[in-house]
Image: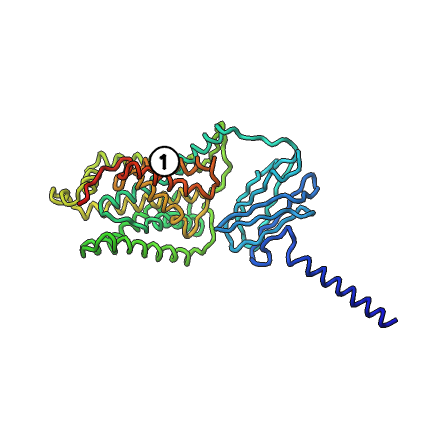
Amino acid sequence: MLAIFLGLLFAALTIATFSTLSAGPAHADEIGTDQYDYVLAGNVQFNQKPLDGVLITVKGSGYDAQVKTGVDGKWKVGVPEKATYTVTLDETTLPKGVIVAKGGSVIKAEFGLTKVKSVNFFLGEGTRTTVSFLDQFVNRFVNGLNFGLLLALAAIGLSLIFGTTGLSNFAHAEMITFGALMTLAFSVYLGLPVWLAIIIAIVLSAGLGWTLDAVIWKPLRRKGVGLIPLMIVSIGLSLALRYLFQYFVGGDTKQLPGAGLAKLNFGPIQLSPIDLASMGISIVVLLAVSYFLLRTRIGKATRAVSDNPSLASASGIDVDGVIRIVWVVGGGLAGLSGILWAYFRPGVSWDMGFQILLLVFAATTLGGLGTAFGALLGSIIVGLFVELSTLWLPSDLKYVGALVVLILVLLLRPQGILGRKERIG
């Protein structure tokens, strides 16, 4: 009897062991929880009943994962770091007659003090409403205009610097980031009103432009360093500043005060109060820059130096003084662009300027190198194309599409839209 009992016990343990091994280390409704410390978790229910097999997608900080809810309606996704993630519920996987009734099918999730963030979806009965192509086009057009205007602030500064010095400044990305980081520091960390923090950040950004020229670029110009070495220096400076930012603020994304306000409906157009303020500020600043370049004495001297530095110097214009002013203006515009970009994304991160650097260069080149108004026009075109392209292309490819347009335009007009032909040799 003892032998039979031990045999049955051994068989039961064997079956249990194989059952455990075949079950795998994680449930079907859990992805990455055994790999990462931070977890996004939630449940999907309808009338207090769990929904099984609903597809959830998590994206953010270069990470992408998908998971389906279990029979209890719950799901978990492990993520590599504390950051802002976009959690999307695929409405096509919901049962017939069930819709996302409140909160939307897309939720921005940001971790707090804990390592677990709950993301729940509110469901109800009804029919799914579809938005017409025309309404989507109009909404995307306005958002593209907003994006193009904030790109223009950065692109005009970059274009003025190139026009007066011939330098392709890759560190312009970090000048963009600097404005957003200073706003974060003075508004969130030091508790100042956000409007005052923005003013301080713009002034400090202008000061950064002055400092970079005084400490690095002017001494190199006086030594007669060529444009290619100067460009390599700007790349090194960009890397140094970028990782210095990461050292002080970390790798996660932080929000500025007022980010994430509810959007207002203007027919098919959806804009938040921050979006409206961003567009208004961009237009006012761009008009002020236009007046500065066309009507003021310094602005005219800037255009003269941009056209021909040697002739401008022979005419009695202080070329070094003009270049210094251009760096100050370019730094201030870049800082303001970074602040508006932080609200448009939304969020402040250590590499946020680098994320749009290629678009800024594309806008500058598309409009015509060294021309401020060309940079404005190029930025509007790039911004519109980036947003409108999402009607046909996946959102991950929208920046690539803008660069394709740049290539096509330059094949037909190498000098850019408002640039002028240059004779070489």
- Residue lying farthest right? 1
Q: Nearer the viewer, residue 136 or 7?
A: 7
- Residue lying farthest bottom? 2
Residue at image location 47% in from the left, 38% down from the top = 393
**Amino acid type of disc 1?**
Ile
Q: Nearer the viewer, residue 412 or 90?
A: 412
Quarter of the image that includes the N terminus: bottom right
Residue at image location 19% in from the left, 44% down from the top = 424
Left or right: 283, with 161 as reference point: right
Q: How many marks?
A: 1
36 up-or-down from 157: above or below: below
Residue at image location 60% in from the left, 32% down from the top = 128
- x%, y% of residue 185? 41, 51
Q: Which quarter of the figure has residue 44?
A: top right
Left or right: 177, with 265 as reference point: left
Q: Which quarter of the figure has residue 26?
A: bottom right
| Other-residue count near label 1 (Cα within 10 Å), few / some / many at <14 / 14–19 / ≥20 | many
Left or right: 44, with 259 as reference point: right
Q: Nearer the viewer, residue 239 or 325?
A: 239
281 up-or-down from 25: above or below: above
- x%, y% of residue 54? 63, 43
> Which of the colour schemes (rainbow, by chain, secondary structure, one colour) is used?
rainbow
Q: Secondary structure at mark 1?
A: helix
- x%, y% of residue 235? 32, 54
Quarter of the image that includes the C terminus: top left
Q: Which residue is mark 1?
A: 381
105 up-or-down from 229: above or below: above
- x%, y% of residue 11? 78, 65
